[in-house]
Every structure is written in structure tokens, then in C-alpha cells.
Image: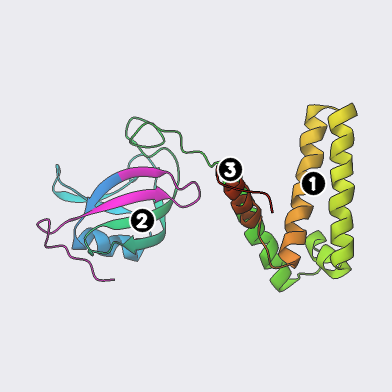
Amino acid sequence: MTIDFEKMSGMVPAIIQDAETDKVLMLGFMNEEAYRKTCETGLVTFWSRSRQALWTKGETSGNLLHVVEMLNDCDHDTLLIKVHPDGPVCHTGADTCWNERNEQNPLLFLSSLNDFIEKRHEEMPEGSYTTSLFQDGLNRMAQKVGEEALEMVIEATNGTNERLIYEGSDMLYHLIVLLTSKGLRIEDMARELMERHNPGWKKH
């Protein structure tokens, strides 16, 4: 990775982002030494402009930032570093330096679940329920979606909200399995809904 440290007198900004939630956590600065140490240790290390010294984030608090991926921008003078944080990032105790909560949007988990199910489809490990669904074939997968949908309807009309969520989750899981078997993803359905939300959309 080629980084232009000369534009800002030997430093580049480093934007820190949670690899799971996509939330921007903080902004720091790195010189070449800080960048090398980050690469060597896998822990985000900055150059402290106030102390004029290297500073591994979390070395005092224990809230370390574990590097998942580092990206360089188009001008080679700004880093985006995706991390797994051990705890709150801000010195105030907040999750982020903008006092935002660093929580994953549950909807994003559907994409991760789809990734997991795709991996099951590729590897087909023995003893996996998901594997057994793929082995049973398309008709059985479609039948399971119907069965779970019916159970969800029953809970909606005669059950509790807790059971409705439970059965609806079963249906959604089996739907993702079915989509995966057809080479599709849950995002394909989300895109369809986005198109329908467009005022110019017409039913086809």
C-alpha cells in the first residue's frame, strides 16, 4: 500500500470504523512509524500530536482496536481502518468520539446470515440442519417456507407477539435458504421493495 505521508508534514488521517456495525468510531493521525507498528501488531497505533509520541489506542484503558482491514483512499493520503473494538472508543467512555451508540442495525445481520447460509451451501458440512435442507431439495425447502409462514399466521391471529416473532424468524431463515438455493439473496428482495417505494413504480 502506497501512502503519501508528505502532504500533511509526515502524517495522514486515519478514520476508524467498526467492521461489524459500520459505525465511524474516531479519527486519529498516523505517521510512517505508527502505520508500521499498526501493521506489525494488528492494533491501531497513532502518532499523538500533543505528546509527540506513538500511542497504541487502548494501551491504558484496555479498549484496544483490533485491525480487520486497512484501505487507502484515491489520493493515497487518508486511511480507512476497519476494526473490532474491545470496548468504548472515546476517552469520555462513549462508544464513539461523536457520542453515538455503536450498535449493529439488526437488519444488517440478515446479510451476514445470508453469507453464513451461502457458506453452508458451498461447504455442505455434515450434521448441519442447513445442509440437510439443501440436500432435501427445492420442493422441501419451499414446503418449509410455507409451513413456517402458516405457523406465523396462526401466532398472529391466535398467539402472542413473542411467538409471532419466533415463527416469523423461522420463516425468514427458511426463505433465505430457499433464495440461496436459487442463487439469490435477501438483498434482491430488499431491492425489489426499494423499487416499489419509488413513486414511479408500476406493478408488473
Q: Position of residue 19 (x, y in %)?
A: 46, 52
**In the drawing, does residue 128 fall left or right of residue 60?**
right
Label annotation for residue 81 = 2
Instruction: Decide: few, some or many residues near mark 1? Use Cα within 10 Å; few <14, some 14-19, many ≥20.
Output: some
> Which residue is at 50% across, 50% downward?
20
Identify the mark nearer the N-term, 1 or 3: 1
Q: Which amino acid type corresponds to the residue marked 1 in the rendered image?
A: Asp
Three-letter residue code for mark 2: Ile
- Tell which circle, 1 or 2, labels the residue nearer the N-terminal end: 2
- Measured from the top left, where is residue 148 in percent x and y? 86, 46
Distance between the alpha carbons at the discs numbered 1 and 3: 26 Å
Using the image, determine if residue 10 lies above or below residue 170. below
Do residues under tags 1 and 2 come within 8 Å of each other at their CB atoms? no
Please give the label number shown on residue 60.
Answer: none
Assign the magenta stretch its main secondary structure: loop
In the rendered image, residue 23 lying in the magenta stretch gets the answer yes
Relative depth, front residue between 148 and 116 = 148
What amino acid is found at the position of numbered circle 3 in the picture?
His
**Residue 196 on the magenta span:** no
Residue named by callout 3: 197
Element at label 3: helix
In the image: residue 112, left or right of residue 165: left
For discs 1 and 3, the disc positioned in front in the rendered view: 3
The numbered disc on residue 170 is 1
What whole-number distance in Å separates the C-alpha atoms at marks 1 and 2?
Answer: 36 Å
Identify the image's colour scheme: rainbow, by chain, secondary structure or one colour: rainbow
Height in image: 79 above or below 95? below
Q: Which residues are magenta?
A: 1-26
Between 47 and 134, the one nearer to me in the picture: 134
Report the mark closest to the observer, 3 or 2: 3
Query: Residue 96, image x and y in percent?
Result: 38, 37
